[in-house]
Image (cartoon, grey):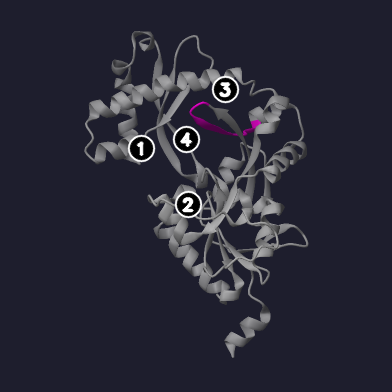
Amino acid sequence: MKTEKIFSEFVAAKIKDYLPAKYQEADCWAKESIGNNGIYRWGITLHLPGEDGERNIYMERYYSELKAGVPMNKIMGEIAAQLEGCRELDLMLRDSRIEDYQYVKPYLSISLINAGANRRKLLHMPYMEMEDLAMICRVEMPYPKGLVIVEVMNESFQTWGVSKEAMFGAAFKNLWEYKDFTLQELAPAVEYLQGGQCEPENLLDVPDGTPVDLQEMLYVLTNREKVRGASAILCPRVMNKISDLFPEGFYIIPSSIHETLIVPKRWGFQIKDIKETTRDINRIMVPTEEILSSHIYEYDRDAGRIRQARESKEKKRGMER
């Protein structure tokens, strides 16, 4: 972290040498910000006189490039281009009337994060808790080059002049109407992401009543963008469909903030074993900033909600004997 700070300070001091003349009057400084799960990240912030906002870029990617041997001049050129691109994005956000709640309302959605690991972050944003998780709102603005995701902070929320219940109600409605969640067999989904030619079938699109051969042990549930897709477990339409596919029940493994894994109960896995495996995967394979939880969940169809899975007393007594 100290070396990233030094790298960020160096970039902030030298970046104007790589920017057009109009940026010579800009202020640029290194800045540490808190991300998901309490992870602090270093970046640079640039403010050009006459502009309302600031341009912020994290340095983690560029510092990794430096360690990999990419020449510093090339890295600085990339950062300069990114800063100039922020101008287009800033104008888009300003013109989008993001301070107008009625305009923003159709773009509201929900992300899931770990409540305990994000206590400091949650002080600055409206949220609702579910088990050990926190639901936060985000705005997903369409953008010619993709999708801009902005988390709703207290400042914006207070400007809108609506209640937390109304805002989350609108976000849930958008989430429940979302048509792009996917449930796929894990192994083919990973193969496709690694360059495979055939995308596996989305089991959520299978018509009701259609026979499906479901012989895999693990299925990945996310959205088509593979970004913040763990929120799929908040959608009753999705969870009821999975209940239909696995009438014997299923466990939900919080793989990361981007996806969850579905494990049919018919395979007889013990909750204790799944928890231990999940903790090991989180520790070894998942970036700390993307960890969602080490708990295992079930879906209560009658209540329409997620709850932590717990071993029954009968099973525990049987194991003790």
Mark 1 vs 3, N-terminal side: 1
Q: Provide the secondary structure element on which disc 2 rests.
A: loop
Q: Is residue 114 visible?
A: no
Question: Which sits in the foreground, 43 or 66?
Answer: 66
Q: Is residue 66 visible?
A: yes
Name the amino acid type tagged 1: Arg
Q: Provide the secondary structure element on which disc 3 rests.
A: helix
Which mark, by number, is residue 199? 2
User: Is 69 placed above or below 208 here?
Assistant: above
**What distance separates the C-alpha of mark 4 from that of mark 2?**
37 Å
Residue 44 placement (x, y as % from top left)? 40, 27
**Residue at (35% x, 10% y) in the render:** 24
Could you say which quadrant of the image residue 309 lies in?
bottom right
Which mark, by number, is residue 61? 1
In front of the other: label 1 or label 3?
3
In this image, 53 relative to 153: left or right? left
